[in-house]
Amino acid sequence: MTAAQSVETLHIPEGLNYECTGCGKCCGGWSVPLTEQDYFRIADIDWGKQSPERYFGKSLFREMRDYESESTPYTHAIMEGADGHCPFLVDKLCFIHAKFDSKTKPSICQLFPYSFNRTPSGTYATISFYSMGAVNNSGRALVEQRDYLESKFAEFNQLYPDHQPNWSQIQLTTGISMTWDQYLTHEEKLISYIKDRSVSLENRFLNGSNYLARIMQEARGSAVAPAVASTDGAANLNWLDKNLLTALHKIYFPIDKLGRGEGDFNFYRFLYQTGFQGLFPGTKIRVPGKSYSFETLERMPFPSTDPDIEDLIYRYFYSRIFGKHYFGAGFGQLSLITGFNHLAIIFGLIKLQSKAIAKLRNAEVVSYLDVAAAVRQLEKRLGETSLDGMAAATFEALMTSNRRVARVLAHS
Ligand code: SF4
C-alpha cells in the first residue's frame, strides 16, 4: 500500500483477536467523555425515574474543563461513581444500553475498543488494550470480522466527522523530513524486527532502534555509528536515564488522581527534578504505599520468555505501530525515531511497573496478570496524555539515542 492508494481503505491488523468478555472492567477508572450530541441525548433522559434508587437526586454529568476538552470532540463527561466505575455500570452491564439501545450510549462506548486512524494510505484499525478482551486476545481474529469493523468505521465517520489527522509534516528525526511512502518502508522493517521471535523482546526493540539510527546517519551523510549489538553489553542506567524513567512513570502510572496538567509531560517539572538530583539522590519507582529503587527492581527477573507474556507484549506494541499511534499525528507530532524509542522505553516502564506490582503483593515472580495490569494502565494513560511543543522537544532531545534504549531495556 502506498500513499497514492485510496484513503478510504480500511487496514486491519493480523494476529489480533477480539471479543467482549463482559467483565465490565472497561467501564471503570475513567470519566467517560461525551460529545455535545451525546450529552444532550443522554442527559435529557430522566435517570431518576428510570432507577430512583440508583440515580434520583444524583449528579451524573459534568462539564469538561478547558484543558481536558482542548483538541477533542468532547464537551462533557460522566462523573465516576464512588467506586471508580461509571455509574451506569450495573451488574457488569451498561444500564443505558439495557434500558434503551446501543445507539443511546456515549459515542466512545459505542466504538470501544476499536480505534481508527486516518492516514495518507488509508485508515488503520486497532483495538484498545484497556480492554481485557484485547489483552487476552479473546474471540475471533479481527481480520475475520471485516464486515463488523467496516460498520464500526462507518459509525466512527458519523460520530467524528472532523477526524482528519495532519500527517503532512512527518519527520525521521528533528530537521529531517520524510515522505509517507518512506515511512511505510520503515514501518515494515520495524514490524519485522518486533516480530522476530528468534531474539529476545528487548533486542527486538533494540534492533528497531539501531535500524532507525542507521537510517538517520545515512540521511545526514555522516559515518554510520556502530550499532549497540545487544542489550547484554549495555552500560548501567545513568542519572538522566533514571530521571527520565521516573518522570515518565509518574505520568503513565500515577498513584494519585491527577490534577490540571499533572498528567502530561511537563518540561519545567522535569528540569526541576533533574536539577535537584544532587540534593535528592536516589530516584525511585513509586506504587501505592511503597517505592522501589531501580537496583531493587533490576534484581527481580522479568519473564520475557513466558509465551503468554511475550505474546501480550508483542501484540500490544505491534498494535500501536500498525495503528500509527506512536509518532506524528498519532502521538504528539513526535519524529519517527523518538516515537519508536519512546515505545521501547515504555516497554522498560512496563517491566518496572510489573515488578513493582508483583512486589506489592509480596511475590518474587512477575505474573501474566501483573504485566496485563501494567499494559492496561499504560494504554489508558497514553490515550489521555498530551504533549505540548516544549514537552515534545524534550522527548526529541532525550529519546533519540539507541544507547539510551539499550541501557533502559537491559536494566529494567
Ligand atoms: S456508559 Fe455504559 S458502556 Fe459506557 S462506560 Fe458507562 S456503563 Fe460502560
Image (cartoon, grey):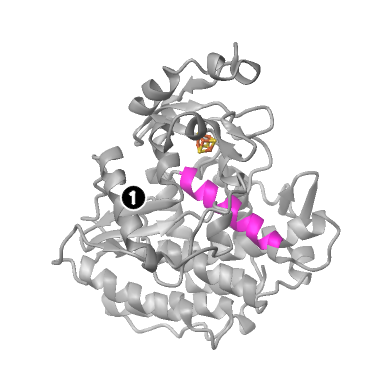
Residue 144 in view of the camera? yes
Disc 1 marks which residue?
Answer: 152
Determine crowd level at label 1: few under 14, some 14-19, many 20+ residues with C-alpha closer than 10 A.
some
Q: Is residue 160 left or right of residue 362?
A: left
Give the answer, above or below, for where 220 lies relative to 356: below
In this view, the residue in front, 27 or 54, is 54
Q: Is mark 1 within 8 Å of ligand 1?
A: no
Give the answer, above or below, for where 236 lies relative to 41: below
In this view, the residue in front, 23 or 230, is 23
Q: Residue 278 at x, y = what percent?
A: 70, 51
Give the residue drawn at x 57%, y 77%.
201
Question: Residue 11 lies in what quarter of the image?
Answer: bottom left
Q: Main secondary structure of the magenta part?
A: helix
**Outermost left residue:** 4
Quadrant where the C terminus sits is: bottom right
**Outermost top residue:** 57
Q: Would you say residue 65 sits in the magenta stretch?
A: no
Magenta residues span: 369-385
Q: Say which element carries label 1.
A: helix
Give the answer, above or below, for where 179 lies relative to 94: below
Q: Residue 297 at x, y = what percent?
A: 75, 64
**Outermost bottom residue:** 198
Q: Would you say residue 373 sits in the magenta stretch?
A: yes
Q: Amino acid at mark 1?
A: Lys
Q: Residue 26 at x, y = what percent?
A: 56, 45
Residue 293 in view of the camera? no
**Outermost right residue:** 362
Give the residue drawn at x 70%, y 60%.
370
Quadrant where the N terminus sits is: bottom left
Q: Residue 53 at x, y = what percent?
A: 65, 17
The image shows a total of numbered marks equal to 1
